[in-house]
Amino acid sequence: MAQFTSQHTSTGGAVLTLSTAYQWLQAGQRAPAATLEIDSALDGAVFPRVFSPGGKERVLRTSLEAAQSVQLGGLAHHVRVGGSIDTSSITPQLAQATTVFERVNGVPARVWRVNVADAAPHWSEVATAAYLSDRIGSDALWVDAGLRLDHLGGRNGGATRIGWTNLYAHISGEVFDARSGIGVFGSYARVGARLPAMALAWGDVNAPTASVYRWVGPDQNAVQGVIAQVGPGAAQGLTKIAPDLARPSYDVAVGGIRMTKSRLAVGVAAVVRKASGEIRAVADPNTFYSTVTQPDPNANFTDGSDDQLLTAYNRKPGSFGLDRYTLTNIATPGDNTIYALDVTAQYSGAHMRLAFSAEAVAAKGTAASRGFRADENDPMLIGDAFANPNATVNAEGGRTFFDRGYIGKMAGTFDLPARISLGVVVRYQDGQPFSRLAIFSNLNQGPEAVMAYQNGRPTRFTYISTTDMRLQRTTAFGSKQVTLIVDGFNVFNIGREVSEYVIGDTNFRQTSLIEPPRTIRIGVRIAF
């Protein structure tokens, strides 16, 4: 990355800032594998494992801003006006030509033959913005309001280009009493979301696709006819981008109170963030299913009071291979919101510094795919949900990957005699939300897992709590300083679980992963 910034102050006090940067990224390129075996109920959904963003990206960013402080109408104004333009050239590598053998809870299910076009895809993005903001008032009372005009465009060589132009507003303010050190603050903003990482792959004839076959195993050669065609590529018209695709946006509101004293700072803030206009790949209605049900114990696996008949979708053989998908804004996205209450405190003494934070978080949204992992339970990714009805069952409105319920962290540094210092970090967080997976074995398309209830309603993994420490001593040797460092991670060797077996059989909720054990690291730092 290379960056250049120039700042000029005029005789009238105006500050003009010009910044330009060039960034070159390369990520996610994987070594090709002729075959791959995935158990989609145990290892995670096949789609994000096979198709994932990567490749090369070159970005040129340029921005220009003018800032001026003036007195108008007896009030102090700090006005900022500016603009920016970012251009990106992307050569993505989304998949390798490979064959994936998919099992479901150990049972052969499907074979995915990934097709990669001869010509490499090439995408381009341009993002431009112009903004104006004005901060009015003093340290005791101020209001900051502004407008931002955004344009975001993307091209992939397909029939439909993405082009969004939106006007966004923000306002914030605070009342602060210097005598008591207490301030009350609040803000609201609407901002536009970036393109999802894989969005431009839809409608691109050079993006990869997969043909999915029925695997009747156990021999890997026991493969029957095509069940489905899967995007994101647009070969033979498989996928397209909706002409009226709208830009997703976030509404973010923050309000709170803070107190600042000479050595102590305390704050309490409430945060609400609501997303709208989620983008998903939706199966066109020429893919036909019938519904089937089976008895299911629901969220309470040991108490029959909430038992249910769980529904799954059985694909009709006459629709095998007739898939078509449209990248569009989903009409019923569920509740994609984050509610958080945040409490912070900091103390700075002569020989001790402490920081504390605690949060209560409720993050809800529609999972991109079945499962609890980061590439599955994220409402702003494009996955199986809405493309496969069995991935959509109970996907809406659950707790997302980012929801950890109650979270706490405390960090402190202590100056001890003989130039010894001690640092301590203590962390707590609730377990990751998940849903029990029920297996439907007798479907025409092969066995599939279905979420029995929404993620995190009410099941979570066990909470995590760790303590890390650093002890160091610095010794001077002339103009040099030598520091001996001893780091301890998970110093109390607490081996709590971080993952569980989530399939609804006799192993349900058995621990599958635990925290790393205690680790001690010794190092030396020499300062010249």
Image (tube, rainbow, N blue to C red):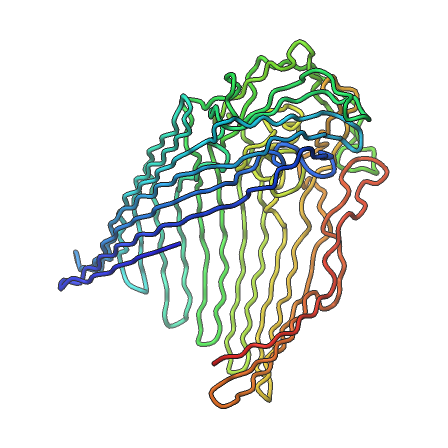
Compared with 228, 365 (above or below) is below
Asked whether, in this view, residue 152 is left or right of residue 497, the answer is left
Number of numbered callouts drawn: 0
Residue at image location 72% in from the left, 57% down from the top: 515
Residue 250 placement: quadrant: top left
Asked whether, in this view, residue 352 is left or right of residue 517, the answer is left
User: Residue 242's x, y, as percent?
Assistant: 44, 22
**Along the line of sight, the residue nearer the viewer: 365 or 328:** 328
Residue at image location 59% in from the left, 53% down from the top: 360
Asked whether, in this view, residue 414 is left or right of residue 514, the answer is left
Residue 314 shows in this picture: yes
User: Residue 273's x, y, as percent?
Assistant: 48, 44
Compared with 201, 482 (above or below) is below
Residue 309 shows in this picture: no
Compared with 441, 138 (above or below) is below
**Along the line of sight, the residue nearer the viewer: 302 or 258:** 302
Quadrant (top left, top right, bottom left, bottom right) of the N terminus: bottom left
User: Residue 398's x, y, as percent?
Assistant: 63, 37
**Along the line of sight, the residue nearer the viewer: 399 or 527:** 527
User: Residue 248's x, y, as percent?
Assistant: 44, 35
Residue at image location 72% in from the left, 19% down from the top: 445
Compared with 123, 228 (above or below) is above
